[in-house]
Image (tube, coloured by chain):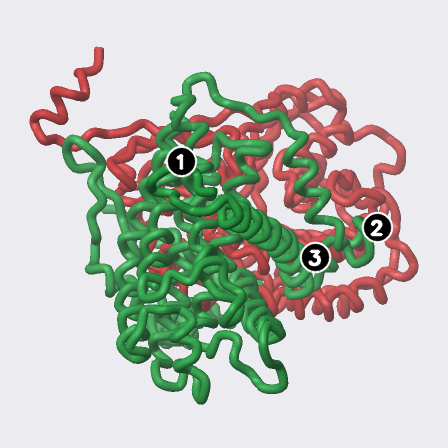
Amino acid sequence: MAENPTNVVARGEPVEMLLNMGPQHPSTHGVFRMVLWVDGEKVTDVEPYIGYLHRGSEKLCEGEQYHQVITLFDRMDYLANFNNELVYCNAVEKLMGLEVPERAEYVRVILCELNRIASHLLFVATMGLDAGAMTPSMICFRGRERVQAVFEAISGARMMHNYFRIGGLKEDLPENFREMVEQLMSVLKADIEEADRLLTFNEIFLARLKGVAPISLEDALDFGFTGPCLRACGIDYDLRKAEPYSVYDRFDFNVPVGLDGDCWDRYYVRVKEMYESVKIVEQAMKQMPEGNVTSSLGRRLARPPEGQVYVRTENPRGEIGVYLVSDGTDKPYRLKVRPPSFCNLSAIKYLLQETWIADTVVVLGSLDIVLGEVDR
Amino acid sequence: MTLPIPLLAISLLTFIWILAGLLAMFTALSVVVLSLTWLERKLLGRLQRRLGPTRTGPMGLMQPMADALKLILKEDIIPTSSEKAIFWVAPILVVVPAFMIWVTIPGTENLVLKNLGELGLFYIIAFSVLGILGLVLAGWGSANKYGTLGGLRAAAQLISYEIPVIMVVIAVGMLAQSMNMVEIVEKQGSYPYVLVLPLGLVIFFIAGLAEVGRTPFDIYFAESEIVGGPFIEYSGAHWSVFFLAEYINTFAVAALTVLLFLGGWSGPFLTGNWEIIWFLAKVYAVIMVIFWIRDVPPPAHRPVDGLCLEGDGPAIVLRHRHYCGVPFLRLAPMVVNLDVLGRSVRGRLRDLPAFCGTGQPGGSGPRQVPSARS
């Protein structure tokens, strides 16, 4: 039984308060829950709780045929659907030794990079909201909505696209795709720049984020950080460069890295990445060949041979890995996902040492978690 | 005839006049609040390239009415664990001082409910502090930890920013040789005091923003972390009372800025009570600046930037990390977004090669992750 607070007070010791944050809290980015022990406004300890959005996705995958699993991947990281479809399709293709038509590869890259921009725009919006800035969120959401309008024209859905297929795509792009994307890129660049100009070097934003919850490279690697969170610590580890998949080795782009690994660096790396993604999309649009995009499987079911495969790609949130075991039937025997935001989130207790209550939401925001992926 | 109360030895007619005056003030302020909410939504919308309210009446003019109606009709939830009496009293404690300030704020030379003479400015400053008591009680009475934190933050914020306000007000009083609001404005007949005390205007305005908790100083109800602070458990009509008080206070800060620094109702072309048009025009201009500020910078929630609370023994003691002037000096450039803090950080970060990436085209082979762990 806990000691009577009156006695603690009588000895002149500080009294800790237990503060429950979430799962219904506007700044926990979904249904994440933290229990904070606070001393005044100082956070002395934190206990994260996850699992409120657990749907058993990995188990569900075992009951679905290979082409049906794509829809489940759409719903894991629901802010980067195309990227998630890509890693799964890549895994099955690798297991089957399927060749993907070149045009399909280019379309995949374009859509994934557009999705990366959309996801990072949402990050900038929520980062601003967590810090209390309202206007950047409006700009970012508008930009994201423009990207999603293009996605809708292509796949028929704003978010759960189900457009990639094992070995190709569902169907070819709409005829006006080129104009659509060119039109989009000009306004999108303006949106990114406007949000960047408004938020990045704002005095108060800097004061809230710079130097908050820094993490060293060694610790970041120990926690299994990947993606922008790791690059903010000063290493240019990006799977698109380090282990190029799809056609990423054909594009000229930079990998932005940070210096101090603090919240602001994690924010700024993502902002810079959006500009790089714009570069990739523009190059891919130029290089994209004509031709077939559909799978060589035709209408047959995918039946990978017995075996196992691990494939990883660079998601907006970091490195997503799919470990797939096949027993030769039309359903996966076992499918395990290594979700980037789950691994990044594992450091929350470490990051929230010696912070204030006001920092907790900013730190959590800077990790850019998606609970659909954390809980699966 | 006189009322049989010794202290209120006034004639019945005077009594009725007082009641009528109070009613007029209440009505006028309510109309002002309605106009402010509409203005804020519209202005914020335009600044963010949205339209703001459009569906309720022409240009969404009926939106404040719709909001008010909705709030009144909503269920008023009182948490079972709350201190009922305090929970009930707190909104009243917030809204009454907000109205009482207006008793002596003049619209023109004659348009003032009760000119308190030399007591005027003193009275205003004294009553502007009282509202915070209601906020602390609201937070504590809700029996909600977020609410309590918010209430304590409100108190800390008040202590931080009350002193700059008082210093500036004293400066104005010395300049005008009077604390009488009307006299202060009349002294500014030839030139407004902003020309004499430009820094005073800036300090008063920013500290005023902090006192009423406008962005960027919405520290005590910080939506993103303590989710509304003292207001967290309030709903419906109770909540709308807080809302009313907040807007009246905002209007009061703008009005005081105008009266103390911008020459009050003095202006060309108009005479007599028509001068209130000048007064209102100036006040609404200041209000627009306040809304504009809400649009641009994020708030300074982090206690480091202004104030902090630390648990210390029996009660949570409010302790300043800096002396009250210091957070203010640090925040002032932030509000107008000057390059004071940013310059050092910016110079270091923006042009560093690290942020420009490695600049090599793709396919340059895998990079080694250093195994820094030993």
In the image, is residue B21 above or below residue B207? above
Q: Disc 2 and disc 3: Cα gap in Å?
A: 19 Å
Q: Residue most toward the top?
A: A1
- Would residue A329 appear left or right of B89 to someone viewing this image? right
Residue nearest the observer in this picture, A183 or B295: B295
Q: Chain of mark 2?
A: A
- In the image, the chain rendered in red is A
- The chain painted green is B
- Look at discs 1 and 3 and give the one toward the viewer: 1
Q: Residue A341 appears at what percent x and percent y?
A: 50, 40
Question: Residue B288 at what x, y percent from top left?
Answer: 57, 67
**Mark 2 / mark 3, whichever is N-terminal:** 3
The residues bearing labels 2 and 1 have C-alpha atoms spaced at a distance of: 83 Å
Quadrant housing residue B86: top left
Looking at the picture, how far across and down is residue B135, in whole percent? 39, 40
Whether the residues at callouts 1 and 3 have beta carbons within 8 Å, the answer is no
Circle 2 crowding by C-alpha within 10 Å: few under 14, some 14–19, many from 20: many
Residue at mark 2: A154
Q: Secondary structure under badge 2?
A: helix
Q: Is residue A298 above or below residue A278?
A: above
Number of marks in the image? Answer: 3
Height in image: B280 above or below A302? below
Mark 1: which amino acid? Pro
A190 and A236: which one is in front? A190
Residue A142 image label: 3
Residue drawn 56% across the image and 55% down it: A134
Q: Which residue is mark 1?
A: B4
